[in-house]
Image (spheres, rainbow, N blue to C red):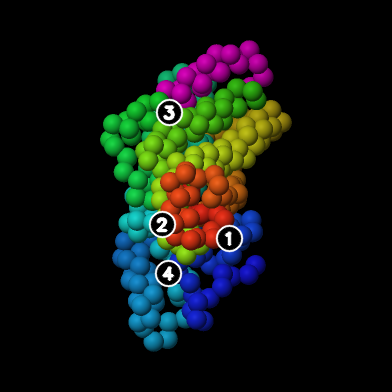
Amino acid sequence: MAEAPRVDGRIDLDRPRWQQNTYIGRAKHFFSVTDPRNVLLTGSQLDKAKELLKLYREKKEPAGVTDDQVYAAKKMYESAFHPQTQQKMFLPGRMSFQVPGNMTITGLMMTYYRSTPAVLFWQWINQSFNAVVNYTNRSGKSVIPESLLLKSYIAATTCAVGVAVGLNKATVKLPPLVGRMVPFAAVCSANCVNIPMMRQSELIDGIDVLDDNGEVVGQSKAAARSAITQVVLSRILMATPGMALTPVIMNALETKTKLFKGRAWLGAPVQVGIIGLILTFATPLACAVFEQNSSIGVSKVEDNIQLKLREMNSKAKVLTFNKGL
């Protein structure tokens, strides 16, 4: 897989290591960003990585620094700092925390899916985690009022709990495998509510769109709608393998083996482990479906942006935007 072109023989720090115009290139990039080992990095290590990249950008890096060292620093930096604000992100909201966070919550949510109190508790925990991730990975410098955060959180939690409790009652007489799929339906429904509400300010005010030279030419609501749609779809794709395959595997283990006979306590750790293994691959592969810096045709953005481009004598046919995660 070809690496991104260099600038004057030096690594381009503003671009991912691998070319992003192919799915494989994006997948390699997100395998790097979502690597759960990055969670173990200390604040000191992250700050040193940030400082090395700063010096490299200024062409003042210490003598003897290799490309591998720069790429290692870039991997650490991208796992913990927001791509646009350059601020260090809250640990549970980082993409590198997706696998350990989701495997634990999802595994327990799918283990204790039968009783209503357990459903209420784990759906609440899951939506709390999702709210942190959505807020941390919002696009650009979007300011989200606390009132909107609370409304989004309540709406998503209510939706997830409502779907889970309702489907649990509706599937009580159906085969156990059907009941195991209820958490998946609840999570998908909540994602369709939580992400658009959490990023509502982007739908109202628009997000930055850039021309061929990387210059911001305006804020587009159309780009915001595209960005949020892509994120919702990728989140659902991210959850699908683990939440759809794990119930089938667990159902087979329970009905066709004696693994859990007299060892009911094994259910939770086995389920968490299976989901963790699946998420290790599903998370980066789902994130890679859409380009991080997505594009939108000039003809699809607002009239005022098109007018500005004409006044600039710009020949741009497409504009780019950061879709968030």
Local crowd at mark 2 within 10 Å, few (<14), some, or many (≥20)? Answer: some
- The quarter of the displayed image where residue 249 is located: top right
- Which callout, 4 or 2, points at the residue further toward the start of the chain? 4
- Please name whichever residue, 223 or 170, is drawn nearer the observer in this view of the structure: 223
Callout 1: 10 Å neighbours few (<14), some, many (20+)?
many
Q: Which residue is mark 2?
A: 216
Tag 1 or tag 2, which sits nearer the N-term?
1
Mark 2 secondary-structure assignment: strand
Report the Cα–Cα distance between label 2 and label 1.
21 Å
Picture quarter containing residue 239? Answer: top right
Marks 3,4: beta carbons within 8 A: no
Taking depth in this image into account, of 33 and 13 the one nearest to the observer is 13
- The amino acid type of the residue labelled 2 equals Val
Q: Position of residue 24 (x, y in %)?
A: 64, 59
Residue holding disc 3 = 156
Q: Which element is circle 4 on?
A: helix
Crowd tier of the residue under label 3, counting other residues whose Cα lies within 10 Å: few below 14, some 14–19, many 20 or above: many
Q: Which residues are magenta?
A: 156-176
Read off the residue under disc 4.
73
- Which residue: 39% across, 75% down? 57
- Of badges 2 and 3, the one in the foreground is 2
Q: Quadrant of the N terminus?
A: bottom right
SS class, disc 1: loop
Q: Name the amino acid type tagged 1.
A: Gln
SS category of the residue bearing label 3 = helix
Q: Are marks 2 and 1 in contact (CB under 8 Å)?
A: no
Residue in the foreground of this view, choosing between 244 and 57: 57
Give the spatial CA distance, label 2 vs label 3. Answer: 33 Å
Whether residue 97 is visible here, answered yes or no, is no
